[in-house]
Image (tube, rainbow, N blue to C red):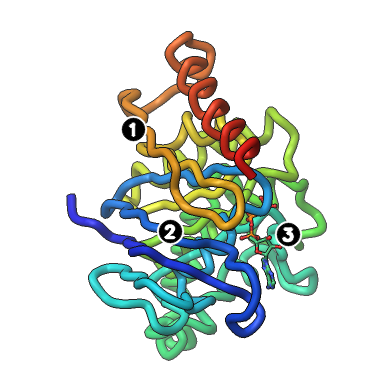
Amino acid sequence: MSAFVELHDVTHVYGGGVGAPAVEGLSLRVREGEFAAIVGPSGCGKSTLMKLATGLQRPKSGAVIVAGKEVVEPIKITGMAFQNPVMLPWRTTLENLLLPLEIVQPHRSRLRANKAEYVARAEMLLETVGLKGMGSKFPWQLSGGMQQRASLCRSLIHEPKLLMLDEPFGALDAFTREELWCVIRDLHAQRGVTVILVTHDLREAVFLADRVFCMSARPGRIIAEREIGFARPRDLDITYTPDFAGIVQELRGHIREARAAA
Ligand SMILES: Nc1ncnc2c1ncn2[C@@H]1O[C@H](COP(=O)(O)OP(=O)(O)OP(=O)(O)O)[C@@H](O)[C@H]1O
């Protein structure tokens, strides 16, 4: 499959381009429809990579290409979810889901006249993640895990081609997190969306991803790339197999080396 997200020898410096780079010589290619996970030591530039890929930051040098076009401004074909779901408390869950449609074209112009169609889409997404009928609840009436499910729906409502997930499950307990791994796994399988997931959790990366990229300590660049060959659909049972544990160990070794080299 062709490359969908490409970073070519990217260097990025915060603070107007003076000072130490956050990432340097960062290159990677994520294929269309692929599920990629990015892991690495704290502060290595994982979130910076996300911001560069979506045009929220421009690199000092190098090139960022998404869907064959150089990224020179924030791109609209992406959906994002973060550790904190940031739902607006005065809006119902359904109204929170519709939020990106009020911003992103062509939905923005279509929303008023086609509200019923979009509401149906939002309700369908809620059902997919196990929140059927919860659209009328306010976010503060939902548990943390339910809010994160709703936030995933919101990131997909405008049918993005690229889904960027920055530590989306970091604040959740282990059981809820594993439940949500399965939600993400199914969303990826159903929608064929390209996913880039940043995580500190190596088990999460190995369970979900087709390929895991390990970054060096700051200034971040890719130091290892690991194909994850487990057949899909994957069941949580694979996380207890020796093969799975072996890959997690291998990745842990890369991160240990990256930290030691810092
Ligand atoms: N807006 C900013 N201005 C200045 N420096 C920044 C800014 N954002 C990040 N940095 C610095 O750039 C480096 C990379 O940050 P980034 O958030 O990308 O790392 P990360 O790998 O996502 O970190 P973590 O694992 O702790 O979430 C860090 O040293 C950070 O302090």
> SS for tag 1?
strand
Which circle, 1 or 2, is nearer the viewer? Answer: 2
Quadrant the C terminus occupies: top right
Give the percent coordinates (x, y) of residue 192.
31, 50
> SS for tag 2?
strand
- Neighbour class for label 1 at 10 Å: few (<14), some, many (≥20)? few
On whether ligand 1 comes within 8 Å of the CB at mark 2, the answer is no
Position above or below: 14 against 257 = below
The part of the image, by quadrant, that contains residue 234 is top left
| Dot 1 amino acid type | Glu
| Dot 3 amino acid type | Lys
The answer to whether 160 appears left or right of 171 in the picture is left
The answer to whether 144 appears left or right of 1 in the picture is right
| Rendered image: mark on residue 26 | 2
Q: How many marks?
A: 3
Cα gap from disc 1 to disc 2, whole angstroms: 19 Å
